[in-house]
Image (cartoon, coloured by chain):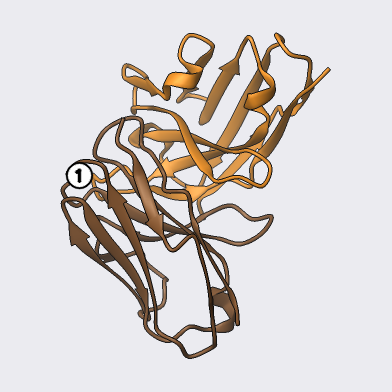
Chain colours: A brown, B orange
Amino acid sequence: DIQMTQSPSSLSASVGDRVTITCRASQSISSYLNWYQQKPGKAPKLLMYAASSLQSGVPSRFSGSGSGTDFTLTISSLQPEDFATYYCQQTYDTPFTFGPGTKVDIK
Amino acid sequence: EVQLVESGGGLVQPGGSLRLSCAASGFTFSYYWMNWVRQAPGKGLEWVANINQDGSEKYYVDSVKGRFTISRDNAKNSLYLQMNSLRAEDTAVYYCARVGDANNYESEYWGQGTLVTVSS
């Protein structure tokens, strides 16, 4: 199985900060990498797919990059509604594993 | 509007069985791969299984192989997860999710989830 890691596991940031979350795969997954946002008690929401494609309706302050094994999700200017947990997921090969998540909270 | 509504969760004893359903609407169900994803209390997301458009391809995470069966009824716009030999570690919120259009197998739309609790 492909293992996914994320760093950091949590971070504290202020509104307006630039935030970067890193995701690493245990083997090359080309660009089969997705990012999700989840708020407490809610279903996950797709933010990015295919590493760098912005899901329809997602604000442009979110961006994704990377290919192969190393990927990043960047929030250019953190907004109050962005405080949540973020997960990466590889869909290169089954099982479609998720990273352990990165919790973004208010500094 | 795409809607996915899960049902069938509840409390079950270890070793028992449960069948989850996911009712889909707002899109042509038979055109899309579908996923089941679960989340144990306070834990991260775990992909469980997926199924292709006509049900001829099914894939599972190792921890549920031989115990869980994913299926679909395109005439009823419904996805199912038959769960047998349930264990305490299967306790989770189970989400059904529709794959997107990008040939990337991402979970574009999600239901609200149904809670399965395995306990004596």
Who's the residue at 35% across and 74% down the image?
A: A74
Who's the residue at 29% across and 36% down the image?
A: A2
Residue B14 sits above or below residue B74 on the image? above
Apparent side of residue B79 relative to residue A29 in the rendered image (left or right): right
At which x and y percent is residue B88?
69, 22
Q: Residues within 10 Å of mark 1 (few under 14, many from 20)?
A: some
At which x and y percent is residue B38?
56, 36
In which chain is the residue bearing label 1?
Answer: A
Q: Quadrant of residue B60?
A: top left
- Seen from the viewer's position, the closer of residues B47 and B89 is B89
- Residue type at tag 1: Ile
Q: Which residue is mark 1?
A: A29
- Seen from the viewer's position, the closer of residues B74 and A37 is A37
Who's the residue at 64% across and 25% down the image?
A: B89
Apparent side of residue B15 relative to residue B97 in the rendered image (left or right): right
- Seen from the viewer's position, the closer of residues A105 and B107 is A105
The C terminus of chain A lies in quadrant: bottom right
Residue B15 sits above or below residue A74 on the image? above
Residue A35 sits above or below residue A12 on the image? above
Q: How many marks?
A: 1
Q: Is any atom of residue B106 visible in this view?
A: no
Q: Residue furthest right?
A: B120
